Image: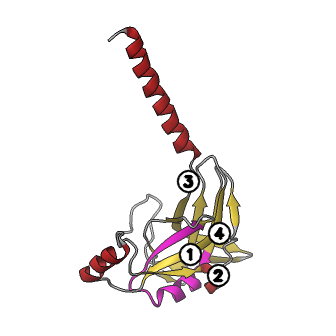
Amino acid sequence: MGPTDYLAIYGAGLSTAVAAWNYARSRSKVRVVLIFSVETVGEDTQAGASIFIQNPSAQTVHITNVSLLYPFKNITIKERIEHMVRFRRLPIRIGWCHSDLSLHGVDDGCPISVEPGKSHKIFIRDEVLENLLKEAKSRQLKAVAQDALWRNKYSNVFEYPAVQGDDVQTTVDEVGEAPTS
């Protein structure tokens, strides 16, 4: 092999790497985060959960719907296998109920366009979450954001703590460790 062959291999490898990098940058990305939060509305402080829809990509993302998911049914192995055979996909969210935020009186601001490097926040009050979790098998929640092309992006599973009055059952002291009482 001569020097031109090495130069051709280098050029082909470099152009492939640049094409892959441009493709990765051109795709829109959405991150959905569900966390416990406290909001002050006027003079009233309310506990609840916040959904953050983040756009780390270089393109504007158009979100059309935001929903909460909660487990409503325990799924057996047989049902999981039947689901895989029937729909030819992994049963990742089988047994989870999708509940649109508008059904619970929560304004999600959709449809919304999230600019690059920005995020959109939706606060859900504790009363709404407790009513939703009455039907659930556990206190686990997920959030899902759907874009204009019907692509869903799910948050991680969030274990919603039980709130008693103004205090949360699981608290952390100033050092960052759980109380040892």
Q: Residue furthest top?
A: 2
Alpha carbon separation for disc pair 3 and 4: 15 Å
Magenta residues span 124-146
Q: Report the residue at 58% width, 45% height from top.
A: 26
Q: Is residue 128 one of those drawn in magenta?
A: yes
Residue 126 falls in image quadrant: bottom right
64 vs 142, nearest the viewer: 64
Mark 2 secondary-structure assignment: helix
Q: Which residue is mark 3?
A: 29
Tell me whether circle 4 and circle 2 mark residues in contact (CB < 8 Å).
no
User: Crowding at label 4, few (<14), some or many (≥20) Cα neighbours within 10 Å?
Assistant: some
Mark 1 secondary-structure assignment: strand
Q: Quick one: label 2 or label 1, which is nearer the N terminus?
A: 1
Alpha carbon separation for disc pair 3 and 2: 25 Å
Alpha carbon separation for disc pair 2 and 1: 9 Å
Color encoding of the figure = secondary structure
Q: Which residue is mark 2?
A: 102
x then y, percent, for residue 155? 48, 65
Q: Report the residue at 47% width, 90% height from top.
A: 134
Can you tell which mark lies on residue 67? 1
User: Crowding at label 1, few (<14), some or many (≥20) Cα neighbours within 10 Å?
Assistant: some
Tell me whether circle 1 and circle 3 mark residues in contact (CB < 8 Å).
no
Residue 119 falls in image quadrant: bottom right
